[in-house]
Structure formats: C-alpha cells, structure tokens
Image (cartoon, rainbow, N blue to C red):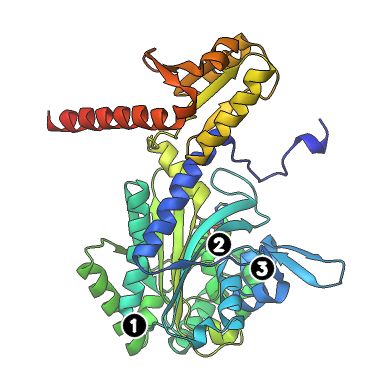
C-alpha cells in the first residue's frame, strides 16, 4: 500500500468512537485545574529551535536525539514542540504575564513531537496536559501543584497510582554532587554508552536518566543527590513533604528520580502506574527556578508538571474503566419524498436551535435504509414524514428504546421532545436513586 494510506509511524488517529473519551478526560483536566485557579494557555505547535536548546538542555535525550527540527522556507530553524513548558515560558515572558500579579497559574493541553522508538505508551506524536505556576517559591506551591496532579488523576477515575518525589537541589549544592558523580562514572567509563561518555564532563546527571540497560544498571549504584543537598534545599524538601502530609497525599521518596529535562531544580516528582508495562510514568514534573531568567525573563521561581494523555488512556483501558455514556442522537427524521425532505430540513433546524441533536437523510435513500441508519447511530427517537403527515401536520414519535409511540404536532416537536426527554431523565434518576438505596 502506498504512503497515503498510512498514518506516519508513531502517530495515532482518535476515531469518532473514541473522541468522547478524550473529551471526557480533557474536560476533567481543565475543570480540575480551574479549581486551583489555573487558566488555559495555548501556545504554538512550533517554536524557534533555540527555545528548546536553551530550556530543555543540549545534553538531554530530547534535544540530542528526539526533536523534529527543520529549516522553514525563510531559513529559520524551527522545531515541533517536544513539550510545552518551553513555549509557555517564552510566552509568559514575551506577553509580560510574569511582570503582573503573581503567581501566574496556567494550564494547557496539546500535541508534542519526539522522534522516539514507537511502542506501547511511547509515540512520536502524543498529547500532554500540564500546568505551570510562576512566581511562587515556597514549598506550599510544590505541594499545591502535586495535589492538583493527584486530583486530576482522581477525578478522571485513575486508580492505584503512586507518587514518587525527590529533590535534585539547586545549582549551588549540585556542584559537589556533580563532582561525586563524575568520580563515580569515571571509574566505569569503558562501560558507558557513547552519548553518556560525552555527557560525563558536560552534565553527569543526565547519565542517571539514560535508557540504555548498561548505563541504567551503573546509574543504580551512583551517589544520590539527596545526600548532597544544601541546608536551604533540604529545608525546602522537608517543608514540601510537610505540606503533602497536610494535604493527605501519600508519597514515596525515590532518590533516583532526576527527570529527563535540564531545567529542573529542587522538587521533582512522578506519578507511576503498575498497569501499563514499561512506560509506567504517566505524569512528571517539578520546580524550575532558574528557567525564566535563563529564557530572558526576570528571576521568577516556577514549577509545573505534564501528563501524557495516551498513557492515561492506556491506564484507564487496562483498569476496565467505564466511561460515561456518550450522548446519542435525540431524533432521526426519516423523510419520504421531496416535500417531506424539505419539512425535515426545517424541523431539524428548529430542533438544533433548541439544543437537540437532530438528523435526517442526506443521502437520498429510501425509508428502509434511512431507518437502518437511524438504528445504527443509536437515535433515541425516530419520526417518519410522508404525505399524510405533511397534510395533517402530525406524526408519530417513536421511542427506539421501548417502542412506545406518541402522536405529536409537528410545529410543537421541539417542546414535545423536551417534555418526553425530561420525563425519561427523571424516571432514570428515580431508578438510580432507589437502586442506590437498596
Ligand atoms: P519517559 O521517561 O517515559 O521517556 P519523559 O521523562 O521523557 O518520559 P516528560 O518529558 O517528563 O517525559 O513528559 C511528561 C509525560 O509525557 C511523561 O510522563 C509521559 O506520560 C508523556 N510522554 C513523554 N514522552 C512520551 C512519548 N514519546 N509518547 C507518549 N507519551 C509520552
Ligand atoms: Mg523521554
């Protein structure tokens, strides 16, 4: 088959049968973020390549191996965003948000692009929901952002998810740590992969995040950064834990978490699921106090997280999550003949004005085929329009669930449908309350 019949490797379509699940999840995310005062920001899918070099870091896997970078026709080097923090930081500086009332709290949902080896939970186009908070240095902010991530996961319906936290200190306390790491890795240099050998001098912490099995085995016994924290960073970590305890959030300290991007300082965290195999991190985040000034803004502390929506979907699927029923077509109007088709168009238009999902035949099919289609789409009600109905101005509204039929005056269709659907909704509510009481 030719290329035009295939999506590019590592990309997925979300089909109409699944899009309601995505909408459910995305709505929960934005709703929950709002409870904490975070408002949506939308930034471009591509940025100047330098934005990512400067923020994500030149020695990271993302920048060294995974970016989709190209020259545009104007000769600019452009990169499809591998994550959204960099573009968000660029935007809050450029638009002056960080020079107004602090903290600035923003959230986003969007596609990300990384040239990685596609496998379960690892794609070349994937989607992240994330938040960034600018201007808050205290440990209460770390705990608030972590609580928000936890509440998003809860509100979506994710179960059995564990939180792991660590502190990777500030540039000050990291000096001694880098020395310790260099000494440790220098003694194993022959076994390290080529990329990590190159990282040893420039950024030895990146070796801790290498995915090669040999490097990760060596990294497992490396010195841990928690032992090298300065007093301020240690106190910040203690306070973060105290605030998490106060919020009733369970966590485990994992001294091996360093995160894959260079900009992190102090608190880093991950939410991990045991239900999706090797790609088990559904959410990663932390503090990045130096990034805003590094990107040309004021010295403004900041922190945030991003969660991979495809991985969340996998967790939900593997936990047999039952999504809420998608709203179905309220009424399908089957029409026989051109006059009936014109009336059906008029009726659909007024029904849609009243907020109903109304459909009628647009393929010029016969009655039988129209009814078959209505059945396939799961229409809640159907109505057949022919010459008799046009003449009398009345038709039979059929409830497809129980077969009951009600005669309706066509000009009162929207009101009647509203009345009947309300009765059904009330009856369902009464049923579910009495079931709950049983
Ligand atoms: P990993 O260690 O799995 O490569 P990462 O550290 O590169 O993850 P981040 O850059 O922190 O990931 O991105 C945040 C989240 O985005 C991840 O926890 C994951 O849920 C999701 N994610 C990252 N890369 C991919 C990908 N290639 N495909 C699908 N989801 C991804
Ligand atoms: Mg990665």
**In terms of image quadrants, where is residue 422?**
top left
Is 116 located above or below residue 7 in the figure? Answer: below
First in sequence, mark 2 or 1: give its number.
1
From the viewer's side, name the closer residue of 48 and 103: 103
Distance Cα–Cα, label 2 vs label 1:
35 Å
Is 35 located above or below residue 274 in the figure? Answer: below
Evaluate if marks 3 and 2 touch, with contact meaning CB atoms under 8 Å apart.
no
First in sequence, mark 3 or 1: give its number.
3
First in sequence, mark 3 or 2: give its number.
3
Q: Which residue lies furthest to the left in this view?
A: 438
Distance Cα–Cα, label 3 vs label 2:
19 Å
Is 98 located above or below residue 52 in the figure? Answer: below
Give the quarter of the figure containing the N terminus: top right
- Residue lying at 53% horizontally and 76% vertically, measured from the top left: 263
Distance Cα–Cα, label 3 vs label 1:
30 Å
What numbered label is drawn on residue 250?
none
Whether label 1 lies within 8 Å of ligand 1 gets the answer no
SS for tag 2? helix
SS for tag 1? loop
The residue indicated by pointer 1 is 138
- Residue lying at 59% horizontally and 72% vertically, measured from the top left: 86
Asked whether, in this view, residue 266 is left or right of residue 40, the answer is left
Disc 3 crowd rating (10 Å Cα; few below 14, some 14-19, many 20+) is many
Say whether residue 280 is visible: no
Q: Which residue lies furthest to the front in this view?
A: 391
Disc 2 crowd rating (10 Å Cα; few below 14, some 14-19, many 20+) is many
The residue indicated by pointer 3 is 63
Q: Position of residue 340 (x, y in %)?
A: 62, 19
The residue indicated by pointer 2 is 215
């Amino acid at each position: 088959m030719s290329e035009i019949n295939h999506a590019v490797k590592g990309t997925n379509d979300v089909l109409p049968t699944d899009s309601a699940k995505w909408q459910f999840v995305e709505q929960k995310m934005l709703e929950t973020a709002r409870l904490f005062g975070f408002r949506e920001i939308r930034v471009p899918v591509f940025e100047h390549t330098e934005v990512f070099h400067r923020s994500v870091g030149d020695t990271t896997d993302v920048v060294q191996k995974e970016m989709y970078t190209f020259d545009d026709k104007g000769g600019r080097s452009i990169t499809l965003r591998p994550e959204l923090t960099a573009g968000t930081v660029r935007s809050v500086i450029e638009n002056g948000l960080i020079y107004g009332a602090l903290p600035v709290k923003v959230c986003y949902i969007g596609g990300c692009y990384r040239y990685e080896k596609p496998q379960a939970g690892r794609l070349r186009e994937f989607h992240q929901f994330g938040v960034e908070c600018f201007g808050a240095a205290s440990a209460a902010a770390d705990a608030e952002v972590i609580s928000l991530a936890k509440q998003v996961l809860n509100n979506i319906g994710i179960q059995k998810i564990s939180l792991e936290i660590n502190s990777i200190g500030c540039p000050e306390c990291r000096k001694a740590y880098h020395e310790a790491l260099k000494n440790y890795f220098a003694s194993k240099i022959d076994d390290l992969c080529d990329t990590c050998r190159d990282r040893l001098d420039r950024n030895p912490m990146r070796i801790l995040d290498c995915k090669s099995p040999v490097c990760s085995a060596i990294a497992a016994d490396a010195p841990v950064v928690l032992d090298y924290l300065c007093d301020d960073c240690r106190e910040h970590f203690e306070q973060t834990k105290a605030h998490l305890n106060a919020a009733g959030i369970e966590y485990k300290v994992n001294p091996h978490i360093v995160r894959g991007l260079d900009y992190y300082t102090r608190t880093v965290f991950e939410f991990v699921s045991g239900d999706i195999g090797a790609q088990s991190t559904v959410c990663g985040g932390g503090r990045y106090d130096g990034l805003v000034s590094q990107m040309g803004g004021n010295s403004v502390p900041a922190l945030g997280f991003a969660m991979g929506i495809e991985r969340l979907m996998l967790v939900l699927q593997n936990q047999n999550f039952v999504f809420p029923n998608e709203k179905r077509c309220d009424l399908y109007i089957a029409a026989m003949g051109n006059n009936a088709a014109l009336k059906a168009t008029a009726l659909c238009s007024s029904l849609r004005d009243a907020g109903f999902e109304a459909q009628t035949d647009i393929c010029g099919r016969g009655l039988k085929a129209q009814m078959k289609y209505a059945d396939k789409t799961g229409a809640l009600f159907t109505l057949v329009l022919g010459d008799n109905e046009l003449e009398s101005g009345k038709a039979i509204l059929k409830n497809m669930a129980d077969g009951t039929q009600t005669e309706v005056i066509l000009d009162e269709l929207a009101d009647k449908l509203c009345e009947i659907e309300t009765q059904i909704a009330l009856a369902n509510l009464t049923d579910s309350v009495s079931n709950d009481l049983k």
